[in-house]
Image (cartoon, helix red, strand yellow):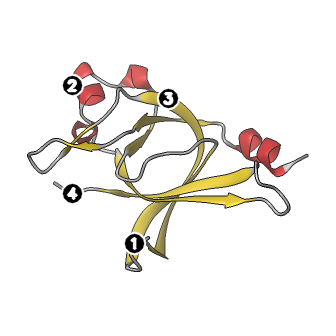
Amino acid sequence: MGIEKFVKSVCVQTAVYWGNPVADGYGGFAFDDPVEIKCRWEDKALIFTDSTGIERMTDALIMITQDLDVLGYLYLGVLSGLTDEQKADPLKVEDARQILAFEKVPLLRSTKAFVRQVFVKRQRI
């Protein structure tokens, strides 16, 4: 079994994803409508280095099957479990977590197959 098939086989959890964060002019972001994606969600604390070279703490590492946007949000659950207000704003979802970093690593000897993961953290407001 190839690694991409393996990743798809272990990504059996459902998460809600708010992507395409665009600054709203008031210090926050506006997002595209949320969608459900498949993932493998591991709640664990990790220290990683972000794209600016700063060490940051994360509270979950999530394996995914598609590219996601940094500063977007993920929630382990389904859309039908959210209210309309929560669907419109991930900050209204208590367990939604902001994507701090996205990694896309090509497989050996491949330019088309990748392993993708994101680092997320709850945002206290």
**Looking at the picture, how far across and down is residue 78, in whole percent?**
46, 28
**Looking at the picture, how far across and down is residue 108, in whole percent?**
83, 63
Sequence-first tag of 2 and 1: 1
Q: Are marks 4 and 2 in contact (CB under 8 Å)?
A: no
Disc 2 marks a residue whose amino acid type is: Glu
- The Cα atoms of the two marked residues, 4 and 2, are separated by 19 Å
Q: Residues within 10 Å of mark 1 (few under 14, many from 20)?
A: some
Q: Quadrant of the C terminus?
A: bottom left
Q: Is residue 8 left or right of residue 56?
A: right
Sequence-first tag of 3 and 1: 3
Q: Under tag 4, what secondary structure?
A: loop
Disc 1 marks a residue whose amino acid type is: Met
Residue under label 1: 57
The numbered dot on residue 77 is none
Sequence-first tag of 1 and 4: 1
Sequence-first tag of 4 and 3: 3
Q: Is residue 106 above or below residue 74?
A: below
Q: Is residue 63 left or right of residue 6?
A: left
Report the front residue among 75 and 21: 21
Q: Under tag 2, what secondary structure?
A: helix
Residue under label 3: 36
**Residue at 25% from the left image edge and 27% from the top image edge:** 88
Q: Residues within 10 Å of mark 2 (few under 14, many from 20)?
A: few
Disc 4 marks a residue whose amino acid type is: Arg
Residue under label 4: 124
